[in-house]
């Protein structure tokens, strides 16, 4: 029997037609290839939530003109301008008995990027930010400090002067909870980071504040990162200041100090 002479019963034809009306359509192959793609990896400097400000744009202004300390205040016997640099110096003949600071006159609020170069010869120093003045006569300050030291043990860490102490060491990403409890992750080896810092030579320091996220960079290497959610301790504004530490004689120099704000 040939194909053209093939005949089917009427009841079978009607059944096949009904089945074609209720059968589900074929499932199309998904063409949205982004749905299950892994997240793009980001550097520590760019890994931001939507609420964290980009570093693009803003206004940059110098905080030191290379000539005078007109916009700063501190002990005249300890701070001076030499060869276009701010220099802080203590001696063994007249040691200081407590930490003292050179304080920027204007307070700084909100997000910012602070950049400068430093050189330390002996002792310990640091850069205060979003800090408060406790004693105007003795130039005593409390608050966040980007640490500097000649032994290269603490440079780059986040220390809270006259507060919570060390908040993050080199190579640590720390989230401080509302109660002060810390969640700590290590993203780099502290000693390896320290090898990129050069006591006795000029080094670049960059401090980035975006909301409650704080980052320190030395010679463009990320030293630490803190998210401070302890609202009764965290600070959103305050002074910038440069430290002279009590103890053995020391000298610290700063230059090319600029502030970017939005």
Image: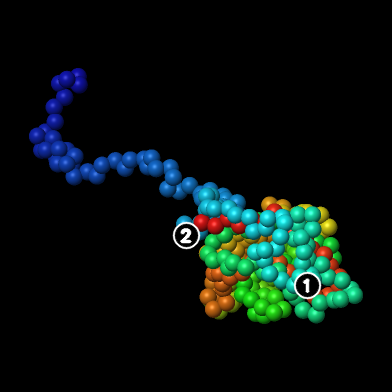
Residue hosting label 1: 245
User: Of marks 2 and 1, which one's residue comes earlier in the chain?
Assistant: 2
Tell me the quarter of the picture where residue 189 sits: bottom right
- Measured in 3D between alpha carbons, the distance from the residue under mark 2 to the one under mark 1, in whole angstroms, is 37 Å
Q: How many marks?
A: 2
Q: Which quadrant, please, contains the N terminus?
A: top left
In this view, the residue farthest toward the left is 10
Which residue is rendered at x = 16% and y = 24% of the image? 6
Classify 238 as above or below 43: below
The foreground one among 24 and 207 is 207
Q: Determine if residue 211 is in view.
A: yes
Circle on res. 51: 2
Q: Residues within 10 Å of mark 1 (few under 14, many from 20)?
A: many
Query: Could you say where residue 230 lies in the image, as x and y percent from the top left?
Result: 55, 75
Say whether residue 144 is left or right of residue 3: right
Specify whether 54 is left or right of 165: left
Q: Position of residue 58 (x, y in %)?
A: 53, 52
């Amino acid at each position: 029997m040939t194909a053209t002479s093939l005949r089917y019963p009427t009841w079978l034809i009607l059944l096949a037609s009904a089945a074609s009306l209720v059968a589900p359509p074929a499932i199309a192959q998904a063409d949205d290839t982004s749905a299950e793609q892994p997240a793009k990896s980001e550097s520590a400097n760019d890994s931001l939530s939507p609420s964290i400000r980009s570093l693009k744009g803003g206004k940059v202004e110098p905080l030191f003109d290379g000539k005078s300390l007109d916009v700063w205040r501190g002990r005249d016997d300890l701070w001076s301008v030499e060869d276009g640099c701010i220099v802080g110096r203590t001696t063994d003949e007249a040691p200081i008995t407590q930490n003292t600071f050179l304080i920027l006159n204007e307070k700084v609020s909100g997000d910012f990027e602070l950049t400068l170069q430093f050189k330390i010869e002996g002792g310990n120093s640091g850069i205060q930010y979003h800090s408060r003045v406790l004693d105007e006569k003795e130039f005593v300050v409390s608050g966040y400090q980007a640490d500097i030291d000649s032994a290269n043990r603490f440079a780059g860490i986040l220390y809270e002067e006259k507060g919570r102490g060390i908040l993050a060491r080199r190579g640590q990403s720390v989230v401080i909870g509302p109660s002060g409890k810390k969640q700590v992750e290590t993203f780099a080896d502290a000693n390896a980071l320290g090898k990129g810092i050069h006591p006795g030579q000029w080094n670049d320091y960059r401090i980035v504040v975006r909301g409650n996220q704080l980052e320190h960079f030395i010679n463009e290497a990320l030293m630490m990162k803190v998210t401070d959610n302890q609202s009764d301790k965290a600070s959103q504004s305050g002074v910038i200041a440069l430290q002279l530490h009590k103890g053995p004689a020391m000298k610290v120099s700063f230059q090319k100090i600029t502030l970017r704000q939005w």
